[in-house]
Image (tube, rainbow, N blue to C red):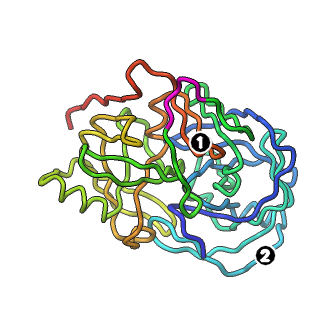
Amino acid sequence: MFRIICTLLLCISLSHAHSQTVKFVYENSLIFVPVRINNENLLFLVHTGANTSVIDSRISSKLHLPVVKENDSVTGTAGRQKVALVRIKSLAIGNTVMRDLTVSRREIENFIAANGRRVDGILGTDVLKNYAMTIDFQGKKIAFQSARIPTGRKKTISFDMTEGIPRVEIRLNDTLNTFLHFNSGSKFDPNSDVYVNLSPLQWESLQQKRQRTAIEKNFVGQGVGGNIFLKAVKLDCIALNRRQKIYNGYAILQPREGYFSDEHSIGFFGNNLLEKYGRVSVDFIARQIVLPVSDTKGAIRVNRRQQ
């Protein structure tokens, strides 16, 4: 069984790894890139919250992908789901080709869409861990390269990998030191606010540090296992690596379901946060997020709107 924040897959060998830039579709803070599998043109979600990759059951049947394991399961934010494992002969992003992948097969076409187009699969960290990705949110281009990103004067946020998912040290409201995963598969409607997601234990720890925090917003989320109902509270400050500060963000409170039923689970942030910097690099080789040079020491201040 795999454990992830949202979705999944497994084994990989690379050939001809080099720098490659492709355009992407950006919708609801999700990045969708064109790929080719066995010479079929497809659309995949870039998902750092998945430690393995996924192909939709419809595409798997169309390409007659051989089954490696019939009965397996994935654990996501809303519960557990049964999957099968299948083998892909080749997967290409531009001219970069990956061969002999074992991925999970499940239905995702009704779960994820990009501008009304069906999404055919998910690129997880089993693929992404081999690259440094530079994401231009304004130009909607993403570059994959097999060498670490030069930093120079740029700000960096270090991360480690837990269960194949990037994990960043953070400080909330200048009181609680904890960790969040970077999950680029978390979906948000376009807005100027910044959101992080907290596990039940993280929320309880934050409450102990701060006596009263009122519920400000309500959401319906979607993940592996179904829909979940969520609440959000205001945060005065979110500090990444205790240095790069974001003021006036929100914390979404995850219920004890699915992945978050584990007391050791931690929350996550996604592209909704990184897009505010315009252009960033997620360097899996050096294990750091690289931010652009800023005269404000990397700080982001969100202007509150009347609720």
The residue under the point 24% across, 62% down is 204
Badge 1 vs badge 2, beta-carbon distance below 8 Å: no
* Residue at 65% across, 51% down: 119
Task: Check disc 1 and report the residue beneath it.
Answer: 31
Q: Is residue 38 left or right of residue 178?
A: right
- Residue at image location 51% in from the left, 43% down from the top: 158
Looking at the image, the residue that sits furthest to the top is 295
Q: Is residue 229 left or right of residue 307?
A: right
| Residue 205 sits above or below residue 295 on the image | below
Residues packed near mark 2 inside 10 Å, few (<14), some (14 to 19) or many (20 plus): few
Query: Which secondary structure is most common in the magenta stretch?
Result: loop
Q: Residue at x 59, y 35 (%)?
A: 281
Of residues 295 and 306, the one drawn nearer to the viewer in this rendering: 295
Return the disc, 1 or 2, that comes first in the chain's sequence: 1
Q: Position of residue 157 (x, y in %)?
A: 49, 39
- Say which quadrant the C terminus sits in: top left
Q: For the residue labelled by badge 1, is the local secondary structure a helix, a strand or a loop?
A: strand
Instruction: State the residue lying farthest toward the bottom.
Output: 71
Q: Is residue 231 left or right of residue 275?
A: left
Instruction: Give me the C-alpha separation between circle 1 and circle 2.
Output: 29 Å
Q: Is residue 11 left or right of residue 234?
A: right
Residue 232 place in picture, x, y as percent? 28, 51
Residue 180 percent coordinates (x, y) = 42, 53
* Quarter location, residue 111: bottom right
For residue 265: magenta? no
Q: Give the magenta part as a residue range.
A: 151-156
- Tell me where residue 117 appears, x and y as whole percent: 64, 46
Amino acid type indicated by mark 1:
Ile
Determine crowd level at label 1: few under 14, some 14-19, many 20+ residues with C-alpha closer than 10 A.
many
Residue assigned mark 2: 68
